[in-house]
Amino acid sequence: MYKSGFVTVIGRPNVGKSTLLNTILGEKVSIISDKPQTTRNKIQCVYTEENLQIVFLDTPGIHNPKNKLGEYMVKMSRSTLEEVDIITFMVDDSKYIGSLDDKIIKDIKDISTPKILLINKIDKINKEELGDIINTYDKMGLFQEIIPISASENLNVSSYLDAVKKYLKEGPQYFPEDMITDQPERLIISELIREKVLYYLDEEVPHGIFVAVDMINERKEKNLIDVYATIYCEKESHKGIVIGKNGRKLKGIGKSAREDIEKLLGSQINLQLWVKVEKNWRDKENKIKYFGYQ
């Protein structure tokens, strides 16, 4: 019997949703950063075994939106709850249920879909602390499974996959077996570049960053691919921060991104980056749509 289905992974920002899916797939599909609200798109990640296919939806973290882009991200996260066969709610090693976690619990409370709770980052706490967190959520009677994991250390991730398989029903193979994401190459490249911007910058600047891949040109005779991309920021002062003194920051972003893009495409990369200002684009409906958030 072939089993398949759709599984959403929800949680507040920075609990490790993208890290989990990259660990399961063995490749970087969703970008990772210690900055909250890193994921902006609903990314479908495809995990396939001989008689099984799981389509994971990596969603933006549910948070209190401060602009139209934030509203779009929260709306997209919540919309997946009605579309899937299994809901995975991820929390971290925090001993207290915060307001955002509480919001998510209320959102999923009356949905009959099977629910799996993942307690991530268990490598950072002791057994007694973990036991207290498990008891807190177990008392709710909301989850069919509660599984402690460390996504970054690949601890108990296989137990999570076993639980998902248990609740999946008979179904078709939705995607080819060698496909791991429905995201176009161009979008993955832009996200890899944005990940490096998040890594190199601080505070509010990263949230106003969008990366557009303008052109990809393959030079077959040289086994070289030219990638031209533009980093958009919201303020003129941010442009200087992205570029850095004598262009050092932009060079660092470019060098780091190029290494990841070369792994993705299996070729040498000539990466050219530009920085432009698009004032307050996160609050402009037309710009949000233009940048692909629809």
Image (cartoon, rainbow, N blue to C red):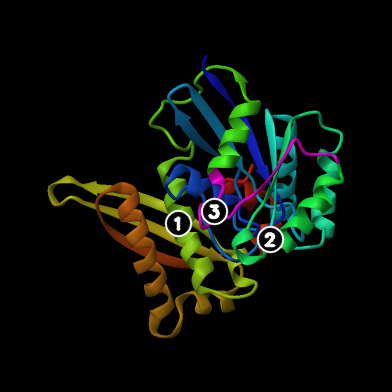
Secondary structure found at label 1: helix
Point out residue 217 in the picture as x, y percentages from the top left corner: 28, 48
Is 173 included in the stretch rendered in magenta?
A: no
Point out residue 258 in the picture as x, y percentages from the top left corner: 34, 61
Residue 236 placement, left or right of 251: right
Marks 1 and 3, the one that precedes in the sequence = 3
Q: Which residue is mark 1?
A: 192
Residue 31 in view? yes
User: Quarter of the image holding residue 117?
Assistant: top right
Q: Which residue is mark 3?
A: 19
Q: Amino acid at mark 3?
A: Thr
Q: Amino acid at mark 1?
A: Leu
Q: Amino acid at mark 2?
A: Lys
Q: Which mark is residue 215?
A: none
Secondary structure found at label 2: helix
Point out residue 282 in the picture as x, y percentages from the top left corner: 67, 58
> What is the span of residues highlighted in magenta in the rendered image?
141-157
Marks 2 and 1, the one that precedes in the sequence = 2
